[in-house]
Image (tube, coloured by chain):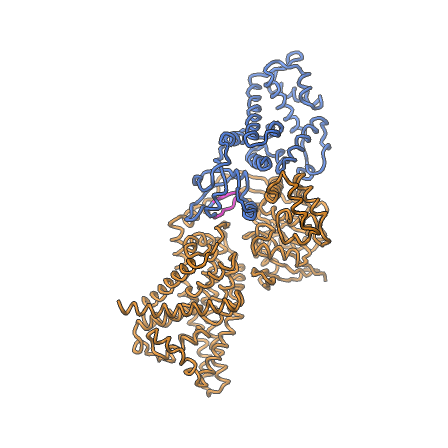
């Protein structure tokens, strides 16, 4: 059996992940290149006589090295040693897709053009003649529809037959001055497997990664010096490339005038991108999601808790040996994890994925931008921050979408104030249950206020140059549910593989410490904290151990204080406890994720600062309130 | 930069029905030069096989006979209009360097369409022909003017001579406006909501941003509409795609109002 490795390359929203899904199903593995933070996904599948490994790359608009996504795709293109590329093109905007396809052809990589959204284009009066396109490009062109699986078999067949690139495959001819500069540069190239013409073009475009292929770097200055006609040769190359792409696109496209265009999309945008109704609907949507989550989450969690409790109760009656402690606490941790993961995290990511695939999330990002910008954050940070409402760990990973490390850390630091599902459980289950819903909401408000102060403070201290808003707003589409599920699973994988095992370990650690009677000795030095917070000394146990396993905070709180909370604590004390346990990087798992993303030192500093800040804030809050 | 203007022009022509051949000239000054050679080449030899290479690659089926006939016909009208009097067939044959049978064919068709009258060995324009010829001359002057004003005097005349055959009245109106504006357009931020504009320039100092914008499909000569105003920028629609743009980015995209004929 022959093996093939095929790269999937295309713009954002061109349907790459739907195609991968249609090709192999949702079984994918995610991997990183060292030194980069953006992921590529790989998936293998056996077809008739052939096993094909598909490598899905991040969505980009051009093969270059300016953003992290582009760097990763470029590396995949040259380091994966792929046998070919499926360039996914958008029939509703063919020339733009061809721009990148022409770049891939410049690299002399065997390419199949998969034409997506053919039906959408026809609805817009755009009819593409694939035969004509094939005739000009001299590469296979296959119209596809990943949703109905139309053309997928043909695509696989075509890919399986993919051999060396045809000599007649389309090459852009630049103008004479540029061509001679390309010739001159490529004659000075070292021996490599990459075509020297491609390298020369990239060098003329100013991609420094490729300078190393030159025998003598001085040639660049010389060639540029000779290009009097093109003081901005890089721009002229891009213009020619786009011009050629649009020429080809126009050759292969027939525009049929439509009687009436669909106006629904425009109407939706009139509301969602309006100066006032836009932010309003965005907030309403987010609140509705929050509501749905709390309601459904509560419902599902109730079922799970009943299930696990009956399972665990048979174990707890046994004697207190170390084995039962490990077993009971470990299982409790897993049960907690599952009972939070499924309802809150997965449900939340499902809803978020739905919003994303419908096309709403990009509109929300635009609306959130003005608010986030005030906090010194780019609009793009909306997605990781929203993910933070599920679980901080995957949200930390999602900060990778941001372009600079400063932006990433600044966004991650705000996870201290975005209550994850575990913290929401404390706020609702403890503060809400014993102090009433208004008290619970005021804890959320306090956390929000603390976050604002923090963000403004950071903005004042650190200069963060964030990228200006430049975002494509995809058309509203009917989401593919399978795709949404797959995406939600990828997002919550961290939770399942990292958070749940650690929850179990945290539970076991607490169980052992508790049995050995060391708990009180360990927490003793921390008693000034409870004094500062005006809480009974024993509450230090849930506060400290909550860091090991946030979901145990509630249970520990009850076990140290008894169930008659309103008799022991005043509402103000319940409030203070809520604030103190909400603000701050929530748990050791989040810390671990931060270490993974930003290094040990920065993660520790961030975590400790945020927790100290939270405790200070809680203490100051109750003092101020009691003064009033 | 002549280079950019050609692209712009070519994209502008995009809106007309007569863009096809002109597209061959897109993207390069040298393409235009070649195009000039190429046109006269074809006209001289009256053969489709005379050129190879890029044009083959780009436009497959090359110039068809009717295209050449159209050019010859328009040239005849132009010459007659410029000379403002009866003109002998010899002069026409002299000015249009093309195979004689083609000229005869062109004259026949022009006469049939009642655009010219042939008296003995002399040719003159009819009233209808006058009008038609003036249109062609207008195109020529507008084009020449545009190229001159935007700083490429040398090629202006040649370019105008070629493009006049391909550009529709609609495009001419827009180009005329450009030459009288003498500027590259207004920043997108100052453009009206929901009005159809045309991108005349993209002026980032940073190539990275320039290439990003171009590769996203925001390109010279494309039609663009601001559909929404958002707090820190605008939402635009171009080529079926929507983009949210920061004010600072929108500022560097220059547009003029697009005028329909």
Which residue does the image show at 50% across and 49% down from the upper left? A470
Which residue does the image show at 51% across and 36% down from the upper left? B184
Q: Which chain is orange?
A: A
Q: Does residue A61 sit above or below B127 in this rendering?
A: below
Q: Is residue A297 magenta?
A: no
Residue A29 position, x and y percent, is: 59, 64
Range of residues picked out in magenta = B236-244
Q: Is residue B240 magenta?
A: yes
Residue A100 position, x and y percent, is: 61, 48
Q: Does residue B95 sit above or below B18 in this rendering?
A: above
Relative depth, front residue between B251 and B151: B151
What secondary structure predominates along the stretch shown in magenta?
Answer: strand
Q: In the drawing, does residue A56 fall left or right of residue A580?
A: right
Q: Which chain is blue?
A: B
The answer to whether any part of residue A531 appears in the image is yes
Residue A99 position, x and y percent, is: 60, 46
């Amino acid at each position: 059996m022959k093996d093939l490795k095929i790269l999937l390359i295309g713009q954002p929203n061109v349907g790459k992940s739907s195609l991968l899904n249609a090709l192999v199903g949702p079984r994918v593995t995610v991997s990183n290149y060292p030194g980069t933070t953006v992921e590529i996904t790989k998936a293998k599948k056996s077809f008739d006589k052939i096993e094909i490994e598909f490598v899905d790359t991040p969505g980009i608009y051009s093969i270059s090295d300016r953003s992290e996504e582009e760097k990763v795709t470029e590396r995949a293109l040259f380091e994966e040693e792929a046998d070919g590329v499926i360039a996914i093109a958008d029939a509703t905007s063919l020339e733009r897709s061809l721009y990148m396809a022409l770049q891939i052809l410049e690299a002399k990589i065997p390419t199949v053009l998969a034409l997506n959204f053919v039906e959408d284009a026809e609805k817009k009066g755009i009819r593409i003649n694939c035969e004509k396109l094939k005739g000009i490009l001299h590469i296979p062109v296959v119209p596809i529809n990943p949703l109905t699986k139309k053309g997928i078999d043909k695509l696989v067949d075509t890919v399986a037959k993919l051999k060396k690139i045809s000599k007649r495959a389309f090459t852009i001819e630049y103008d004479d001055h540029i061509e001679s500069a390309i010739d001159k540069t490529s004659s000075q190239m070292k021996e490599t497997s990459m075509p020297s013409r491609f390298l020369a073009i990239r060098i003329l475009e100013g991609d420094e990664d490729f300078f190393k292929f030159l025998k003598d770097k001085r040639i660049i200055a010389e060639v540029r010096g000779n290009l009097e006609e093109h003081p901005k040769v890089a721009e002229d190359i891009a213009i020619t490339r786009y011009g050629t792409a649009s020429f080809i696109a126009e050759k292969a496209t027939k525009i049929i005038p439509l009687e009436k265009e669909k106006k629904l999309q425009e109407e939706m945008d009139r509301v969602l991108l309006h100066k006032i109704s836009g932010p309003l609907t965005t907030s309403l949507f987010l609140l509705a999601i929050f509501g749905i989550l709390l309601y459904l989450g509560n419902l599902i969690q109730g079922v799970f808790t009943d299930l696990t409790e009956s399972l665990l109760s048979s174990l707890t009656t046994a004697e207190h040996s170390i084995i039962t402690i490990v077993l009971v606490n470990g299982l409790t941790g897993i049960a907690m994890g599952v009972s939070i993961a499924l309802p809150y995290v997965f449900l939340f990511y499902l809803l978020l994925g739905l919003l994303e695939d419908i096309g709403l999330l990009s509109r929300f990002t635009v609306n959130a931008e003005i608010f986030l910008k005030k906090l010194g954050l780019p609009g793009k940070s909306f997605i990781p921050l929203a993910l933070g409402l599920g679980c901080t760990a995957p949200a930390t990973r999602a900060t990778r979408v941001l372009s600079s490390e400063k932006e990433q850390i600044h966004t991650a630091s705000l996870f201290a104030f975005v209550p994850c599902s575990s913290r929401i459980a404390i706020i609702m289950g403890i503060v809400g249950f014993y102090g009433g819903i208004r008290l619970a909401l005021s804890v959320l408000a306090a956390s929000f206020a603390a976050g604002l102060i923090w963000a403004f403070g950071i903005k004042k201290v650190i200069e963060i140059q964030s990228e200006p808003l430049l975002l494509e707003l995809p058309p509203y589409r009917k989401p593919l549910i399978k795709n949404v599920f797959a995406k939600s699973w990828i997002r919550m994988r961290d939770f399942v593989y990292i958070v749940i095992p650690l929850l179990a370990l945290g539970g076991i650690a607490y169980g052992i410490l508790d049995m050995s009677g060391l708990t009180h000795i360990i927490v003793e030095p921390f008693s000034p904290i409870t004094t500062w917070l005006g809480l009974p000394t024993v509450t230090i146990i849930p506060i400290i151990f909550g860091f090991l396993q946030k979901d145990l905070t509630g249970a520990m709180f009850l076990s140290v204080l008894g169930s008659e909370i309103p008799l022991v604590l005043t509402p103000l004390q319940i409030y203070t406890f809520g604030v103190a346990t909400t603000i701050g990087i929530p748990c050791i798992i989040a810390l671990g994720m931060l270490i993974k993303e930003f290094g040990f030192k920065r993660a520790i500093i961030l975590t400790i600062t945020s927790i100290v800040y939270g405790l200070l804030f809680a203490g100051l809050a109750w003092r101020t309130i009691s003064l009033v | 930069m002549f280079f950019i203007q050609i692209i712009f022009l070519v994209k502008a022509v995009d809106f007309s029905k007569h863009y096809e051949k002109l597209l061959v000239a897109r993207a390069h000054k040298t393409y235009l030069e070649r195009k000039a050679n190429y046109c006269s080449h074809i006209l001289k030899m009256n053969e489709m096989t005379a050129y190879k290479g890029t044009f083959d690659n780009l436009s497959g089926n090359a110039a068809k006979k009717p295209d050449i006939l159209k050019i010859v016909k328009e040239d005849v009208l132009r010459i007659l209009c410029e000379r403002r009097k009866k003109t002998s067939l010899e002069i026409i044959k002299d000015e249009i360097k093309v195979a004689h049978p083609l000229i005869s064919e062109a004259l026949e068709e022009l006469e049939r369409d009642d655009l010219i009258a042939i008296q003995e060995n002399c040719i003159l324009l009819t009233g209808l022909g006058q009008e038609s010829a003036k249109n062609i001359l207008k195109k020529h002057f507008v084009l020449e003017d545009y190229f001159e004003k935007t700083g490429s005097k040398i090629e202006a005349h040649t370019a105008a001579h070629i493009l006049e055959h391909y550009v529709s009245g609609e495009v001419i109106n827009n180009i005329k406006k450009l030459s009288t504006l003498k500027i590259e357009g207004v920043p997108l931020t100052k453009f009206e909501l929901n009005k159809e504009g045309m991108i005349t320039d993209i002026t980032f100092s940073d190539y990275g941003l320039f290439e990003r914008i171009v590769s996203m499909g925001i390109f010279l000569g494309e039609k663009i509409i601001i559909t929404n105003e958002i707090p820190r920028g605008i939402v635009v629609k171009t080529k079926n795609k929507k983009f949210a743009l920061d004010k600072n980015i929108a500022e560097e995209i220059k547009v003029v109002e697009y005028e329909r004929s």
